[in-house]
Amino acid sequence: MSAPNMITLLRIVLIPAFATAFLYDQRGLALALFILAAATDALDGFLARLSGQQTRLGSFLDPIADKFLMLTSFVLLGLRGEVPVWALVLVFSREVVIVGGWMIKHFLTRISTVNPSGLGKATTFAQIVTIVLFLLDPALKDVHEVLDLALYVAMAFTALSGLDYLYRGVKELEKRA
């Protein structure tokens, strides 16, 4: 297995550790594990491109690992009432659009590659920043305007990228029809 794929698998393994730390109110540890997991997202892709080790497995595993990390994080924050329900619905809806679109594309065309968009990458970055800020919340005290702004920016990117993936997927399928 390539080093980039092993790094992606590390991200997947870090998710339950992060969740456990969060659920046991170990905010500092949860934050450190989340930042480590998020850093592996940038590292695995960079190493794969740099070393020429881009694989089909990696192109599939990487976005799945991202989705698990983001969904787990938002669900945990939602369970604590730190993130509003509408944000959870938006994050889940985007992922349903992306994964559902991928499944339809694969079923109709047998193409299984996942091509992230720039807007999708910006969404992941905005979501990571937002989650880090929410994990820091007790240390930030009284700066809820910053948290609200980060959340609204991340959710705007989330909505726009979901619509973008939907639009691009429909256009691609129309070309093949």
Image (cartoon, rainbow, N blue to C red):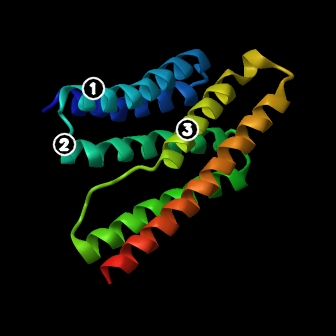
Q: How far apart are marks 3 and 2 (CA)?
A: 27 Å
Pick whichever of labels 3 and 1 is earlier in the sequence: 1
Identify the image quadrant of residue 109.
Answer: bottom left
Per the image, label 1 sits on a secondary structure element best described as helix
Numbered badge on residue 73: 3
Q: Nearer the viewer, residue 147 or 45?
A: 45
Residue at image point 28% right, 77% down:
108
Pick whichever of labels 2 and 1 is earlier in the sequence: 1
Please determine whether, in this image, residue 90 is positioned above or below residue 139: below
Residue under pointer 2: 55
Q: Quadrant for the C terminus, please.
A: bottom left
| Residue 39 point in image, percent of width and height | 43, 24
Specify whether 134 is left or right of 91: right
Specify whether 52 is left or right of 40: left
Count of residue discs? 3
| Residue 124 point in image, percent of width and height | 52, 40
Q: Distance between the residues labelled 2 and 1?
A: 12 Å
In this rendering, which labeled residue sits more in front, label 3 or label 2? 2
Identify the image quadrant of residue 140.
Answer: top right
Pick whichever of labels 3 and 2 is earlier in the sequence: 2
Q: Distance between the residues labelled 3 and 1?
A: 25 Å
Mark 2: few/some/many CA within 10 Å (<14, 14-19, 20+):
some
Q: Which amino acid does label 1 sit on?
A: Leu
Please determine whether, in this image, residue 79 is positioned above or below residue 164: above
Mark 1: few/some/many CA within 10 Å (<14, 14-19, 20+):
some
Residue under pointer 1: 47
